[in-house]
Image (cartoon, rainbow, N blue to C red):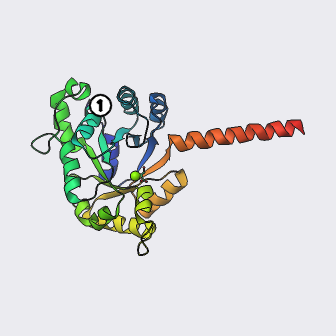
């Protein structure tokens, strides 16, 4: 089991946009459905999502049939990053990275010595550890999230960190961070991050919640966008179905 990040990393390397699906509900069955759709990446959200480890392990195996499985870890910690990769994720998205030092720590946690501090183990890596080790150096996607004022201040240094493959904006948290800031709008901050990534020759991505937003951001030069997520889709689909059923019922009654 090697090179699980292949599809997403090769699209980024070729200057193409990665269109991702985002799963938070903790359902391996949804991962199986998503894997049938030829997404470039399927992201499993462990920061805000409902995943347990056995469920995540099953979901990653299903996702990798058709896409690059990525894990948004709960925090920038070597144990969490190592666990996600040991389960077979092709890469990690690390939230709330505020400085070049924190970005370098995330990169180190994702790589084995001498390039980093990841510990060797896990059912999937050990199936063919020599092959996995050889592929992992250039085949593990590391993405750091920009979602605070401090990250914004340090964006040039963060984007320049070797081994950061993708700088990924969390617009929700960034909006919270900038709420009281009269001098900085969210869109201006997003533009500054994109420009810093261009300057550093790094891919910049942004969380989006709909196909329209994903298309628009891709058109602006963002190289990793999210077509939708399972919570939003389930909520909208269920709401629409219920409303449609009720509308039919009232039409029949009248
Ligand atoms: C944010 O918008 O803050 C995110 O983390 C997206 O998931
Ligand atoms: Mg966030």
What is the x, y in percent for residue 125?
Answer: 22, 29
What is the x, y in percent for residue 27?
Answer: 46, 30
Asked if disc 1 is less than 8 Å from ligand 1, the answer is: no
What is the x, y in percent for residue 142?
Answer: 27, 47
Neighbours of disc 1 within 10 Å: few (<14), some (14-19), many (20+): many
Q: Residue furthest right?
A: 254
Give the position of the N terminus as an image quadrant: top left
Q: Between residues 84 and 34, which one lies in front from this camera angle?
A: 84
User: Which residue is pictured at 67% across the width and 42% down the height?
Assistant: 240
131 left or right of 195 in image: left
Give the position of the C terminus as an image quadrant: top right
User: Can residue 66 be seen here?
Assistant: yes
Which quadrant holds residue 249?
top right
What is the x, y in percent for residue 226?
Answer: 45, 49
Is residue 221 positioned above or below 92 on the image?
Answer: below
Q: Residue furthest front?
A: 180
């Amino acid at each position: 089991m090697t090179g699980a990040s292949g599809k997403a990393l090769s699209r980024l390397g070729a200057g193409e946009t990665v269109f991702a699906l985002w799963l938070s509900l903790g359902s391996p069955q949804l991962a199986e459905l998503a894997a049938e759709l030829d997404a470039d990446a399927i992201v499993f959200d462990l920061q805000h999502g409902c995943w347990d480890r056995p469920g995540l392990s099953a979901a990653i195996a299903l996702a990798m049939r058709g896409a690059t499985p990525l894990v948004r870890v709960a925090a920038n910690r070597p144990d969490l990053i190592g666990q996600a990769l040991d389960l077979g994720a092709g890469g990690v998205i690390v939230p709330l990275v505020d400085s070049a030092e924190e970005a370098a720590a995330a990169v180190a946690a994702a790589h084995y010595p001498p390039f980093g501090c990841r510990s060797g183990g896990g059912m999937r890596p050990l199936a063919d550890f020599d092959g996995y080790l050889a592929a992992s150096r250039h085949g593990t996607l590391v993405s750091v999230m920009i979602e605070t004022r401090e990250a914004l201040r340090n964006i040039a240094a963060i984007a320049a960190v070797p081994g950061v493959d993708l700088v990924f904006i969390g617009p929700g948290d960034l909006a919270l961070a900038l709420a009281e800031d009269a001098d900085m709008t969210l869109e201006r901050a997003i533009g500054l991050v994109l420009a810093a990534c261009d300057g550093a020759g790094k891919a910049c991505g942004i969380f989006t919640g709909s196909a329209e937003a994903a298309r628009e951001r891709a058109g602006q030069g963002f190289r990793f966008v999210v077509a939708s997520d399972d919570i939003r889709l389930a909520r909208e689909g269920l709401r629409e179905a219920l409303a449609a059923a009720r509308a039919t019922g009232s039409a029949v009654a009248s």
